[in-house]
Amino acid sequence: MMNHETMTATILTAKNEKGYTWEQLAESIGMSPVWTASCCYGMNTMLEDQAKGLCKTLNLGDDVAQTLQSCPHKHWDNAVPTDPLIYRIYEACMIYGDSVKDIIHEKFGDGIMSAIDYKMHVDRVEDPKGDRVVITMDGKFLPFKRW
Amino acid sequence: MMNHETMTATILTAKNEKGYTWEQLAESIGMSPVWTASCCYGMNTMLEDQAKGLCKTLNLGDDVAQTLQSCPHKHWDNAVPTDPLIYRIYEACMIYGDSVKDIIHEKFGDGIMSAIDYKMHVDRVEDPKGDRVVITMDGKFLPFKRW
Amino acid sequence: MMNHETMTATILTAKNEKGYTWEQLAESIGMSPVWTASCCYGMNTMLEDQAKGLCKTLNLGDDVAQTLQSCPHKHWDNAVPTDPLIYRIYEACMIYGDSVKDIIHEKFGDGIMSAIDYKMHVDRVEDPKGDRVVITMDGKFLPFKRW
Amino acid sequence: MMNHETMTATILTAKNEKGYTWEQLAESIGMSPVWTASCCYGMNTMLEDQAKGLCKTLNLGDDVAQTLQSCPHKHWDNAVPTDPLIYRIYEACMIYGDSVKDIIHEKFGDGIMSAIDYKMHVDRVEDPKGDRVVITMDGKFLPFKRW
Amino acid sequence: MMNHETMTATILTAKNEKGYTWEQLAESIGMSPVWTASCCYGMNTMLEDQAKGLCKTLNLGDDVAQTLQSCPHKHWDNAVPTDPLIYRIYEACMIYGDSVKDIIHEKFGDGIMSAIDYKMHVDRVEDPKGDRVVITMDGKFLPFKRW
Amino acid sequence: MMNHETMTATILTAKNEKGYTWEQLAESIGMSPVWTASCCYGMNTMLEDQAKGLCKTLNLGDDVAQTLQSCPHKHWDNAVPTDPLIYRIYEACMIYGDSVKDIIHEKFGDGIMSAIDYKMHVDRVEDPKGDRVVITMDGKFLPFKRW
Amino acid sequence: MMNHETMTATILTAKNEKGYTWEQLAESIGMSPVWTASCCYGMNTMLEDQAKGLCKTLNLGDDVAQTLQSCPHKHWDNAVPTDPLIYRIYEACMIYGDSVKDIIHEKFGDGIMSAIDYKMHVDRVEDPKGDRVVITMDGKFLPFKRW
Amino acid sequence: MMNHETMTATILTAKNEKGYTWEQLAESIGMSPVWTASCCYGMNTMLEDQAKGLCKTLNLGDDVAQTLQSCPHKHWDNAVPTDPLIYRIYEACMIYGDSVKDIIHEKFGDGIMSAIDYKMHVDRVEDPKGDRVVITMDGKFLPFKRW
Amino acid sequence: MMNHETMTATILTAKNEKGYTWEQLAESIGMSPVWTASCCYGMNTMLEDQAKGLCKTLNLGDDVAQTLQSCPHKHWDNAVPTDPLIYRIYEACMIYGDSVKDIIHEKFGDGIMSAIDYKMHVDRVEDPKGDRVVITMDGKFLPFKRW
Amino acid sequence: MMNHETMTATILTAKNEKGYTWEQLAESIGMSPVWTASCCYGMNTMLEDQAKGLCKTLNLGDDVAQTLQSCPHKHWDNAVPTDPLIYRIYEACMIYGDSVKDIIHEKFGDGIMSAIDYKMHVDRVEDPKGDRVVITMDGKFLPFKRW
């Protein structure tokens, strides 16, 4: 079976050569851009139809489609991200962590926002003072079980 | 001058005794809950009116109001958060980091979402399968300067 | 409000002086031992009745009961535990991590065992070759959402 | 001699191509799934019969069988696991570590649960609110020697 | 697409063989030396004209020019730099960090110097006691938004 | 002798109460703001006249003046700074480190910019698109000795 | 209950004032020196008779005796020890780790030396070229269970 | 010259194919097993006769013998070992470190056990309750020089 | 017994008040400055006469003299030193480590420079181009034992 | 251009085959052994004559000579060295760091020993009790600038 690193590299090369955006690829399989990209980066798994659809769009073989369906070991190298774009999101998470935590507890009680039953969107919002990036994290509230 | 750790402890005790939520405190000074909480956690600074208004609501002295206006050295102890609620946000940031990065570059070009010209909201969205936590990160796009 | 460190120390001292086990304390409020201990260690929150019941059993004041109900910032100091008993559990988690992961994926598909909708039990099982510690981790399966 | 990384990759490829689950492979040699998988991941060693049996099932050569019998240097790269499924187990180990420790001491005295004389099982338990993952850690109690 | 590591190696080899300095290369595309070098090190992206101009000067192919235009994942291996020259800059940043922070707050209010809307220059200033390296960091002030 | 932590706290309190800026304090002793602040933060030492002058301005005792003249053990807690303002300077140092290094070598040969025979200034430069922070690092070039 | 840090400090002070060696203290309760010291450092627990005997010898109260019997959370601060004496033992463990591992596997099969059913002795062996420290680690062999 | 990684792999393969134990290899050159293994793992150097003798036994070439005589840069990747067998030795070193240190000081004065003028043995000691691994660390005492 | 932190603080205060240098203190007990200072920093132990002599010079009590004679647990907080002066020594150790190692092996064979049977001196050497710091590390060569 | 890793390997192989010591190689170009070795390890740069001279002695090509003249990015992998010989130097640096710092300040004032205008020598000094390694660090004193 093709490993996930090779799968990612193969997809990115094909995507780049054909000039697709993640939005276009996502649309071709009826899913959202962040999720579609995350599968290609080996951070999520597609269903058979989705994997085959994506490979058809990109003209890739069945080995890519199979790896897209197999559960990856999700990992990252740096506990603190270095890329400036990703670091800013990390920083916001650390700066506002306790504030967000308190407010979730006030609105829901003791529990968390799921990162599994979870959706994420990135939007461009026009603004005369400079357009804005709006990232939406949308996860099911999970209350801590008492037993 | 009161240091920021004492300021945070003083505010949290008063907030708890009087039974205010961050939403109520924020409303009392006409600001948003996440930002208001972040100031009280020593992660942002208030203007004079805001600081005095908050201290009036909580019946706190001028020393608290002054520290709320002075720029804190923002820091956190653990590069990887341990609290499950904050870890889930961190995890989402790491799992979806490259996907979000690609999509921002496709929508805006090379640059980042500012964590300074930045707003953040936490909402509860009702859902029959379980209510959802929706966190919105909203930052100005900043293109890398070429010089 | 009493902070969680003081709460833990107060409860442990009272528990020790009165000679209760976690099993007895848990029974007094109709809950399980691991969960009851975890609340007292500042890793979970009790409902009002549970907190008051525990404090009555231990003859502790209302400030303890209130802190038992407030959401703690859960943290630990060492990413790798040093205590031999806890290290053995960590080691098993690392040695068998990929094996357990594969088997969960084979039985359930892509997803995780929740650590929030989660129960944990510790039992002593008699064995002529030496009694055995049996730890049961019991968490709801959460499939990764596709969106 | 084939090294353990190559052995693991060879077995995973064969297992995937033939479509076996760990449960089926384990059954073919009369052992349990977690243990069988752990040997293939280079975290345990098989006896000669077990190794040959597994290689026969998967149609693999004698070099694989020999490496399955040789003691591996067990290692992992990240002290804190990043994969969400494995992290949740790690998190439970850290959140409930002191609670589990206390209860073991109350039930057995000073000592540990062995991670060597140790068995581990993963089960799927049906539940109308969502099926549950049940992981059982079963290790011999070892009292600290006094000398 | 050529990856950024190969791109950097290819450019450095060509630059070395032809004997160009960064200043000369920068001049050939009408930009500044630090920025030009940073693009070649995979830390910034060029516009099409700049990338093609640089490749023409160095007699490099279109694949290099394309990678110069694609957004890199910016990363570094050591959180604390080991090279003595870079360490000295890091050391100055840590030794004078709080002093610089205070003065920026006194001159501008709460906010930061942008590292995105940012320019950097390196100059040699003659001095009879030994010539001096003058590094200028020039970034837009960004005030923390209050919301 | 007063230790450096107490010295810093004493000076910051007095500075705050009297409402001085670092620029004003620096001017009172005929030195520059960054250097003056760095002495007060325990990162540099003053000569006797400077220390006494500063203490006179702030109405502080001789014990403060003496500690200002004694060589501190310079240290910081986090290898990677968390404060957003200081992190941005760190990030620029890491993103542009190799570029700056190459250019210094091209202009001077093998060596470093001294962080000891070193001056640093912070300026506010007006700009219609947003005023800019300009930080100047100015250190003597030190060539590596060959022996 | 007295915590373990206070217990250790109390015992060390008394031991020092009365001029006892660990060997003498160990003899007074019929145990060995390393184990006796380890209990006093909060790394092992004594039985009631041993604890009371030690406290009688050192003229210490019942609170010390009780803490000596309660299971400590064993921890150390530095993953790599800095003290030269302890570092040398750590270094030997790392330099000879794989060699010792191989030889144990050759003599016993796959398994480990227990650190729980474990004894340790320190002896002085006279030698004309310089007396030698002989440390004996003596642990039960535990074979990995196959299940 | 053959590097030490290749040397180790070459020796281990030959040792495995010919079915030698470290004890047998050590005997063939009149040395001890731990030391012989440590040379083959690149942690010590042999004299010419020893290196040639070992290579003759294993039927290996002169390049292996030469590398066995050259001083390696001794290194290990993980400051905290992950292999359970080696971790147990590490754990014992950390749990009993201060106890062993005190006893050595009481028996010898201020100094250390040398890890250079050092011998190490591994023995199997029969025991009806389970055979025991006995590791002997035997190093010259080195008193701290006073000058 | 006075602990070593208090001992160090007490000595440094007395030394400062009386205006002694380490050279003068060392001379008063007939020892060298680096060693004398290291004892006072809790990194070495004095003999009774030396400890009493130093305390007499500084007019300190017997408790200081006793702690000066007791073996300290030597430790440091930062694996990489931050103080610029100490960092430069660390840097030289890392930059020239392999070179020094090779040359020692060429001059002595396989072994090390002892850090225990070790002396260290700091000298000021006049030089018209700027006086020089000369640090001499002088340790007994210890050959690796073969056994 | 040949990279520095290849350059180092090429030189070490040639040096080994021809049987030169660093002392002999250094003499052949009229420089010192530590510096000559450091250039070959990619930690310093040679002038053209030195590089060509060394390559002539070792019969190496012009590509090696060119890389010897180009400024390397100096780096090391482990912040704390593991090789026993290098660790001992590191340990001495950490154990005696504050003592050396104080004495330099007493002899020179506030400043550092340069690691750039720096020379280092390794000598063998005969001693009837065992020959000694003497390492001399000789760096220009650099006073902290006041500005």
Image: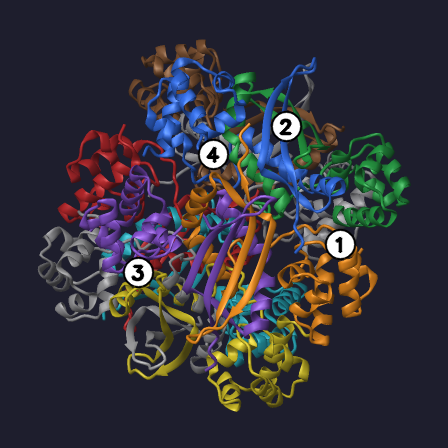
Chain colours: A cyan, B red, D yellow, F brown, G purple, H orange, I blue, J green
Residue placed under numbered mark 1 in the picture: H47
Vertically, is I53 above or below I47? above
Callout 2 crowding tier (Cα within 10 Å): few <14, some 14–19, many ≥20: some
Q: Which chain carries label 2?
A: I
Q: Kindly indicate the quadrant of the structure image that contains residue B51.
A: top left
Instruction: Answer whether residue A76 is visible to the viewer in this image.
Output: no
Q: Which chain carries label 3?
A: D
Residue placed under numbered mark 2 in the picture: I136
To the question of a shared chain for discs 4 and 1, the answer is: no
Q: Disc 2 or 4, which lies upstream in sequence? A: 4
A20 relative position to G50: left or right:
right
Indicate the position of residue D30 as horizontal and vertical percent values: 49, 89
Identify residue type, mark 3: Asp
Rendered image: mark on residue D98: 3
Indicate the position of residue J44 as horizontal and vertical percent values: 73, 36
G44 relative position to F93: left or right:
left
Q: Distance between the residues labelled 3 and 1?
A: 52 Å
Mark 3 in CB contact with mark 1 (< 8 angstroms): no
Identify residue type, mark 1: Leu
Q: How far apart are marks 2 and 4 (CA)?
A: 18 Å
Callout 1 crowding tier (Cα within 10 Å): few <14, some 14–19, many ≥20: some
Identify residue type, mark 2: Thr
Which of these two is toward me, J118 or F137?
Answer: J118
Residue placed under numbered mark 4 in the picture: I43
Q: How far apart are marks 4 and 1 (CA)?
A: 37 Å
Identify residue type, mark 4: Met
Indicate the position of residue G66 as horizontal and vertical percent values: 21, 54
